[in-house]
Image (spheres, rainbow, N blue to C red):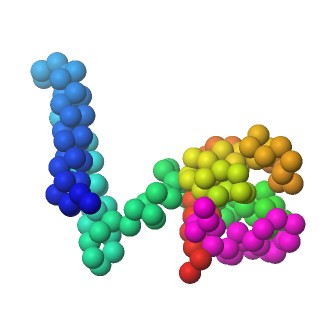
Amino acid sequence: MPTKSAYLWGAGLTVAAVAAMAWSAVRPGEGVGAAAVLWAEDAWRASADWYQSGPGDRRPDWETSALYVVNADPDRGAALMTQYGCGACHVIPGVTAARGSVGPSLDGFADRAYVAGVLPNQPGDLVRWLMNPTTHAPQTAMPDLGVREGEARDMAAYLYTLGGG
């Protein structure tokens, strides 16, 4: 298994390469080069902070980070599940009146291997499922509700908060 310094070197080289490309595209005297350097420093700092914020053994939780949905708000996702009436068919912990019995309970969703038994339980696949389930499983009872991508990302982020405990 690679060491912490190997991960940091890899992240650092990536950030440095992106910063160098951005800097080389700017003419001397323009302020964008300085902005690129600041962006690279911020990216490096965010990567280091993420690595350091892991569990007590200072190892990142790769399984949890694999379920991170970029640019999503789990609180908004719970509200959207109420708005779209997901609780009419599913039991969804933390979602008001979500006590349906047509579809499976979504308790412990983050720990599942598959989405609806047809797609790997990964953020991109879950978002696509929420947007258009019948594309992936034509015989599914889950209806296409017209969920937009941003909404599906928020809903997915909420579902990934539902671990098995």
Question: Where is 142 relative to 98, above or below?
Answer: above
The location of residue 103, given as percent across then percent down, is 82, 65
Left or right? Give the position of 80 relative to 33: right
Residue at image coords 58%, 68% = 111
Q: Position of residue 7 (x, y in %)?
A: 23, 54
Task: Say if 38 sits above or below 75 in the image.
Answer: above
> Is the residue 40 above or below the residue 75 in the image?
above
Q: Main secondary structure of the magenta part?
A: loop
On the image, which quarter does residue 35 sit in? top left
Residue 36, percent across and down? Answer: 23, 35
Q: Quadrant of residue 102?
A: bottom right
Q: Quadrant of the N terminus?
A: bottom left
Residue displayed at 18% across by 23% down: 24
**Residue at x 28%, y 54% (from the top left corner):** 47
Name the image quarter holding residue 2.
bottom left
Q: Is residue 21 left or right of residue 157?
A: left
Quick check: is 105 in the magenta stretch?
yes
Residue situated furthest top in the rendering = 27
Extreme residue toward the left, this view = 28
Rendered residue at 70%/69% (across/down) = 106
**Magenta run includes residue 72:** no
Q: In the image as oriented, which residue stretches furthest toward the bottom?
A: 165
Percent x, y of residue 75: 59, 65
> Is 145 or 61 nearer to us in this picture?
61
